[in-house]
Amino acid sequence: MELERAVGLKADGSVRLPERSAAIGSILLKLAAMGVRISEDKGDGELLHLAGDLFARYREQTRLLSHHLCPADARIQRYIDKLLTEVAAAAPVRLPAETFILDQYGLARELSLPVDADAWHNELVSSYRLDNGVLHNPVNDRRTTQGVFHVAEGGLPIPADKTRVPLVTYVRLLEEALRPPAELLRLPFTANWPEPVETMVSLLLRPLVCPAVPEISPEKRMEIRYFVPGGLVSNLDFVESIFGNAGDPYLPANDAALDVDGWTGHSGCVILAPHLTRLKKKDVGLPQASNATQAQRAAGMCWTDENELYNEGRPFKITSRDMDGVMVTILADNYFGYCKKEVKTQIGYSANLFGGAEEEHAGGALAFATFSLGDRFVPDLMRLESTKQHRFKEVLALLGERAKLHPSGYATDGIYPEIH
């Protein structure tokens, strides 16, 4: 990974963030390519004019490829399609094909504040520009774990301390997560424009799962795609500051599947959707209490009043994952700590499936009984009915045709030729 683009550092460890003017110019060009009209007083009018035809062609190509996803998203979408098939969903649920892509470190920080102001506020976060960087203050800066962790049915076993959720409910939550309200989609960068831009923002991560062992094996990384409404881009500023930015997911150079030696084979997805706390239990497919199982009633996965909110209106996270190596998590909260911890949870998931690696948040690991049968057989420790004396001919008689006798006086096992 290129340190400057990934984490804003030079090879010697010194800070190398993009100049603010360069970051603003890059953002304006990306917005123009997305079809946003940029007034001449906000950017290089001559450059935007000269590139107008190029942007128009790009927009037309984007329209024609509106169903085309980058390789990482395509792998995640196949998993989502499988879930839709299992619940016989009436309508498709698709990841957004067009988002504002954070392809280098530092863009999220510039996007999280108006281009012409030093402060930004919405109902979930307040951001301030400081002399030494930025300050992001989410509405809630600490959380309890009580009733927070929900897991969709199907796939891997669900730990007893997690809330079990019907798969149909997970699918409906996923559908709503990808349809945030307009006010949540509004980019802080454009907050003071006559027509503020409303878009989803995405980030590609390649966090380390298994460090390299010199002269033995290369490092192994998984891939994680993050999707947030534009108004919560500050969350991605926080996340990429910890785990780095893996670049544009549409470029072959950043396709994990082409990194044969360095990919664990696992894909993660995180979708930020704090608006889900307003959904009603009935609307997400939970049964009425009289039709629910005892376990569903105990977990609160049913309703008696039609106006009951899912999880009593409290923030939560819900995930779906299986042995195929894809994990899709929805965070109904913008608490920065959960955004960081979810990446570590997915690293732990990849470590468990990949093997040979551990992660500090790998709680709930699948454990299988194993036995060491040793690598030597010492017959003097065995008791036979007739005698403690063992002879080669007795071994041949016991094994019969399975033993292949060699003229030089030893035999080889017929199934396991490495055993003599």
Image (spheres, rainbow, N blue to C red):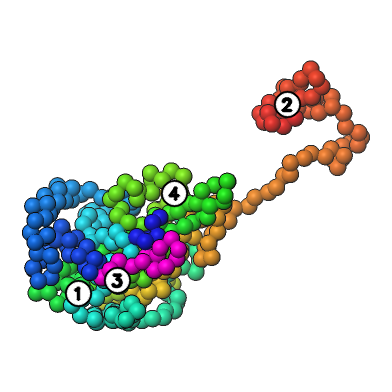
Question: Disc 1 designates what residue?
Answer: 115
The image shows residue 323 at horizontal and vertical percentages of 45, 50
* Crowdedness near tag 1: few (<14), some (14–19) or many (≥20) residues, C-alpha within 10 Å: some
Q: Earlier in the sequence, mark 1 or mark 2?
A: 1
Q: In terms of depth relative to the viewer, which is nearer, 64 or 182?
A: 64
Pointer 4 and pointer 1: residues touching (CB < 8 Å)?
Answer: no
Tag in front: 3 or 4: 3
| Distance from the alpha carbon under mark 4 to that under mark 1 | 38 Å
Foreground pick, 124 / 368: 124
Location of residue 326 with respect to 178 vertically, above or below: above
Residue kind at label 4, given as amino acid type: Trp
What residue is rendered at 33% in x and 64% in y? 105
- Judge whether 322 appears above or below 117 on screen: above
Residue 195 appears in the rendering: no
Question: Of label 4 and label 1, which has the lower sequence position?
Answer: 1
Question: Looking at the image, is 20 positioned above or below residue 2?
Answer: below
Residue 256 position within the rendered picture, expressed as x and y whole percent measured from the top left: 38, 49
Instruction: Name the residue rendered at 53%, 62% in the picture.
Output: 359
17 drawn magenta: yes
Q: Secondary structure at mark 3?
A: helix
Marks 3 and 1 sit apart, C-alpha to C-alpha, by 11 Å
Residue found at x 84% / y 27%: 392
Residue underneath mark 3: 109
Q: Which residues are magenta?
A: 7-20
Query: Taking 397 as reference, is 370 left or right?
Result: left
Q: Which residue is mark 2?
A: 412
Marks 3 and 2, how far apart at CA = 67 Å
Label 3 or label 1, whichever comes before in sequence order: 3
Q: Secondary structure at mark 2?
A: strand
